[in-house]
């Protein structure tokens, strides 16, 4: 009843799983698991949980009905190495506990993220925040080269200031957002699901999506039933607005018209086809 | 480097430590310990922590200088049985994760808190929120008896409604604040210290103070160095206001007068004698 | 561009809107409104929001795509009088700022909630947390009477202890959960929406639902466009799980089977008919 | 009783107060003020506040005794333009509500922070996170020039990528931490005090300290009594550890020895002289 020891999670402990060119995610520790969610739900709902004899059924019920607090009883601690521009998106999730390396205390290492040629893309025309088509291979290569050169130049300038004895907190201010940083990041499963819902989404920047993929792969080892319910009821779920639902009922012969028109109608059709909100 | 296994904490796991007449605190699980605080601080401060070779020195330094985030990397999960009026004070600490038994799902048990005769006290005259003198033994006994009778009567009324088939969520609304409830309560060490600072204080209601004592005793097993630093720099520390500090310097021949007068002066004298803020 | 002054909200300021038999909600103050959401979104998304020339369109876009942070820029302060059992459900929302009357400092007033006869109901058989059928009028009346008598008895016992000079913090411990308390409760619009989603739900206890209704009515005055988008995309929305969505596509001739069976299939049919998750 | 309109705060609304070479702080809105703190405290403490007839006395009492919740009832919204390396320190305060400009949606402007020559300093030898001596004027000038040149080069590289049509979310990754960003930042007074305590401290990096100075100057206009109490009991206060307090009592002839030795003793002497924790 005390520690939840989960063999598959144990096997991952202290292993660096590579992400991007120089980053990683490492599971430092975990507390609780599927069994803890069940235990704490049984404290809350007592008799209300009697009918769910099996853990999977109870976990499904909890997530389906948004009884989210039992999922907070599972906690995961990660050590992550990630580019600063990713860290800036990541830190917006305020419900985690973070210890990040400080450029005031330490000399930063010569580690920068450069996208692979295949990841270099043009500005999307229809999606204001995203990537569109891929440039020709040669053009992508040229972009990548110029990025690398700029990173080299900036790191050289940084080390020159450090060598002159300039304060670290000043010397670092021209380091680019592609520089790698590291942190300990601890989060409970409920809040991790919220993070994953946003960061596994197709609209999230590809770089943070790759980290989210890795976090999710690790979470599945630590709490497989919870993660399956998350996929079923959150990640893979599709939400229809009030008007869209009326249209749905209409189509299935159960309603009497919704009045969806124009762009709203197009978004609905797109959602029916792809499951995606646009 | 993964799980911190601390023998003294392991020995406590799943043991109910009695508090008040029918309550308890039980350590369900813990993640991290002194070593985790040190690990995560070394991520943050890197070279900056090299000079503190010993963990105790580094932990002392962190707490003394309010580098609080590494203490968030230690997490404790408790199962607590406590009267509702205590739960209402406790829940004001918003930085914890809670699963409480629900009177909508379950029939509440016949467990009420009645103070021991020695704990029954008169309203304090000078402290608006506290207890003053003790009544005579007979008077205290009478108060206790009348409390017990009222609790019996209220529980009988409750079971009558339940037996009639009235909805649990309605039947319970006349149950008193002295009824025991239970919850899982998970908190990180930094926020536990904040809780303890307020709830171990002489101004806290005695009943919650007894729970705080027990939580602190458990935390000392799980993270002894951190708790020692907490006692040194937070719990046992004394803070002087700007004016009071000027007065202090003055008395020690290092300042030139503070102008503290009247009640503020009396509070200062009291603080010098007792270490307590009034 | 500074204060958002909204005439309809101004008209509500400092008016107590009755809820239940003796409770109320009063709008103390508000900061921001629809215009502030638009302003702060334009800071975040800059050029990205140019195409939404109209505020309503932008607000719709933000909520539809879960860009929730601009909604945090609107803040509402309420003064609420509510029974303690409602307060205990309410306080579980941790993202608000609360000042509640303290029974340690003040003598509590003789104000108790007693349900109207029409609100007294039997335990639901199929819904573990809810109410089912209504008892006969006479039986309901009897329940109500016995509740009132118990409340009177408990308040008499309380005042006797107070009159004897027993400490307020002890005298109050047998007061029932039906006692009214009061608090200042301040919350931002994003978190209010989350509160409303849960507390306007048919599964929420009727008493807190009535407060949620009132909060929502007030919010609609202060931020009408935001509240309309909330109704469209959150409150009135219907979410289908991964499997349910496959079934939907199937029925509409766009997919190839979902494999939904048994209870899951029944829940799906129920959802299609009523829009409700069960 | 509704809106707190404070003339001095009104006068500041929508005025950009310059900070650093190109940054600013602008008060967008505020809710509440000294009067709101008093109102909400009177809800909480009722009779307990009777003896404080004047607001200043009550506010003093609240802060002195860490009754912090009434201070959460005052909320301030700022628009801030600040370098990214400052933003990264700032965002660690999780109890605020933020909308930041996004480099995925907008092309970033050509605004970089370059320290004035007088602010360029060598690494401190004894303080691992801080600045030490000033280099010669010529050397400082050279550092500044090289910083400016690097910023120009990086911005040119950025606009080249943008002009080629490369996705904004990629083009920006080599922009330096000295680039200016902007955000709406909303915080309550209690949490602002915590922010100020840390960021007005001599150990905070000078650049963020200048922003903290400006925030504090604005807060003083909106809630002068609260800010005066903050200066008295928090900002200007001096805290002595358990052992240091014993030493203090000893020196003043009220104790019997503390056993403070070595570095701990030196820190104590330093604190007595300067009021600073080291």
Image (tube, coloured by chain):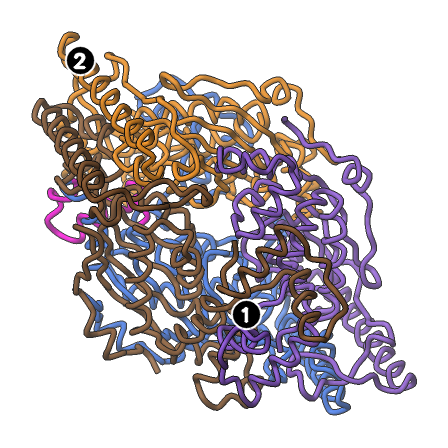
Chain colours: A blue, B brown, C orange, D purple
Instruction: Give the crowd class for mark 2: few <14, some 14-19, many >=20 residues within 10 Å.
Output: many
Judging depth in this view, the residue of C192 and C183 nearest the camera is C183
User: In the current view of this chain or complex, which residue is farthest to the right?
Assistant: D138
* Residue A234 percent location from the top left of the image: 35, 48
Disc 1: which chain?
Answer: B
- Quarter of the rendering occupied by the N terminus of chain A: bottom left
* Above-or-below relation of C206 to A28: above
* Above-or-below relation of B17 to C152: below
Q: Residue at x 25, y 66 (%)?
A: B29
Judging depth in this view, the residue of D96 and B159 nearest the camera is B159
The image quadrant of residue D71 is top right
The image quadrant of residue C153 is top left
Identify the residue under disc 2. C140
Q: Are marks 1 and 2 in contact (CB under 8 Å)?
A: no
Identify the residue under disc 1. B66
Q: Which residues are magenta?
A: A48-69
Q: Residue at x 36, y 80 (%)?
A: A15
* Residue B262 percent location from the top left of the image: 65, 51
Asked if the magenta segment contains residue C63, the reply would be: no
**Do callouts 1 and 2 point to residues on the same chain?**
no
Q: Residue at x 70, y 66 (%)?
A: B246
The image quadrant of residue C23 is top left
Q: Secondary structure at mark 1?
A: loop
Q: CA distance from mark 1 to mark 2?
A: 59 Å
Judging depth in this view, the residue of B235 and C183 nearest the camera is B235
Total label count? 2
Visible residue check, residue C13: yes
């Amino acid at each position: 009843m005390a520690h939840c020891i989960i063999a598959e999670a144990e096997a991952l402990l202290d292993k660096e799983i590579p992400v991007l060119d120089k980053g990683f995610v490492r599971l430092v520790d975990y507390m609780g698991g599927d069994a803890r969610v069940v235990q704490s739900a049984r404290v809350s709902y007592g008799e209300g949980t009697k009918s769910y004899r099996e853990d999977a059924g109870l976990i499904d019920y909890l997530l389906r009905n948004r009884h989210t607090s039992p999922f907070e009883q599972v906690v995961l601690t990660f050590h992550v190495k990630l580019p600063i521009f990713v860290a800036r998106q990541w830190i917006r999730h305020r419900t985690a506990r973070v210890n990040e390396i400080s450029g005031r205390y330490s000399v930063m290492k010569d580690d920068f993220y450069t996208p692979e040629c295949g990841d270099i893309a043009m500005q999307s025309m229809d999606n204001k925040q995203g990537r569109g088509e891929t440039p020709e291979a040669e053009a992508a290569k040229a972009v990548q080269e110029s990025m690398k050169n700029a990173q080299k130049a900036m790191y050289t300038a940084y080390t020159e200031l450090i060598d002159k004895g300039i304060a670290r907190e000043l010397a670092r201010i021209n380091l680019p957002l592609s520089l790698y940083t590291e942190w300990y990041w601890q989060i409970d499963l409920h809040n991790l699901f919220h993070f994953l819902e946003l960061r596994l989404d197709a609209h999230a920047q590809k770089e943070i999506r790759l980290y989210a993929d890795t976090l999710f792969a690790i979470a599945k080892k630590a709490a497989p039933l919870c993660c399956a319910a998350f996929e079923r009821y959150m990640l893979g779920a599709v939400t229809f607005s009030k008007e869209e639902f009326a249209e749905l009922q209409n189509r299935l012969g159960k309603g009497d018209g919704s009045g969806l028109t124009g762009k709203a109608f197009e978004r609905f059709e797109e959602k029916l086809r792809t499951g995606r909100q646009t």
